[in-house]
């Protein structure tokens, strides 16, 4: 007997849907996952890379973010990126740069910007529903950015 294989669905939004999602995110609220979703939607960085972001990774004069480590959620520690190619500098638009300059004011340079205490997939689902776009996970947010930017 042959079992039917479950068909996999690619989890991504179109460029216009990403823009709608970004428009409903509240990056001013400390107690939600919108900040991480916003950063991933604007840059396409990986979830573990976003969790590893610290204030020292931002360069607000150049509007860039250095990706040089990840956060290991199981071990609760920083780890290096897997390959040299993953160690990179990502461009931020001026809007994202300005928002994160405000967000990290007063934080220690080596403090993580994002907490482990938030269910980021639940936040992504809630935000997608609020924006009226298909529901995607945080991993789908990255896929959406990559597809929309021809990567």
Image (spheres, rainbow, N blue to C red):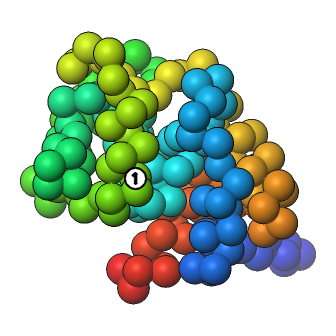
Residue 3 in which image quadrant: bottom right
User: SS of the residue at dot 1?
Assistant: helix
Q: Circle 1 sits on which residue? A: 96
Q: In the image, is residue 147 above or below residue 118?
A: below
Q: For the point 40% across and 56% down, which residue is it?
A: 95
Q: Which of 90/77 is in front?
A: 90
Callout 1 crowding tier (Cα within 10 Å): few <14, some 14–19, many ≥20 = some
Q: In the image, is residue 10 above or below residue 40?
A: below
Is 93 left or right of 79, judged from the image as shown? right
Q: In the image, is residue 9 above or below residue 42?
A: below
Residue 118 seen by the camera: no
Direction right: furthest residue: 1
- How many tags in the picture? 1
Is 22 left or right of 50, judged from the image as shown? right
Where residue 20 appears, x then y in whole percent?
68, 68
Where residue 15 appears, x then y in whole percent?
57, 79
Where residue 107 appears, x then y in whole percent?
32, 17
Q: In the image, is residue 23 above or below residue 52?
A: below
Q: For the point 22% across and 54% down, which residue is it?
A: 63
Is 69 left or right of 16, judged from the image as shown? left
Direction left: furthest residue: 84
Which quadrant of the figure contains the C terminus? bottom left
Q: For the point 78% across and 68% down, which residue is it?
A: 133
Where residue 12 appears, x then y in whole percent?
62, 71
Q: For the point 65% across and 49% down, which residue is it?
A: 25
Which quadrant of the figure contains the N terminus? bottom right
Residue 132 in which image quadrant: bottom right
Direction bottom: furthest residue: 150
Residue 13 seen by the camera: yes
Residue 80 in which image quadrant: top left
């Amino acid at each position: 007997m042959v079992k039917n294989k479950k068909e996999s669905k690619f989890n991504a939004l179109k460029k216009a849907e990403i823009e709608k999602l970004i428009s409903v995110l509240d990056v001013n609220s400390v107690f939600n996952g919108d900040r991480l979703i916003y950063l991933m939607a604007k840059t396409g960085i990986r979830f573990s890379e976003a969790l590893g972001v610290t204030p020292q990774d931002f360069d607000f004069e150049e509007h860039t973010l250095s990706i040089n480590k990840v956060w290991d959620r199981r071990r609760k520690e920083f780890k290096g990126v897997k390959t040299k190619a993953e160690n990179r500098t990502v461009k931020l638009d001026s809007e994202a740069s300005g928002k994160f300059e405000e967000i990290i004011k007063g934080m220690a340079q080596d403090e993580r910007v994002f907490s482990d205490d938030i269910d980021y997939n639940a936040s992504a689902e809630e935000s997608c529903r609020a924006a009226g776009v298909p529901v995607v996970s945080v991993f789908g947010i990255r896929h959406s950015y990559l597809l929309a930017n021809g990567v």
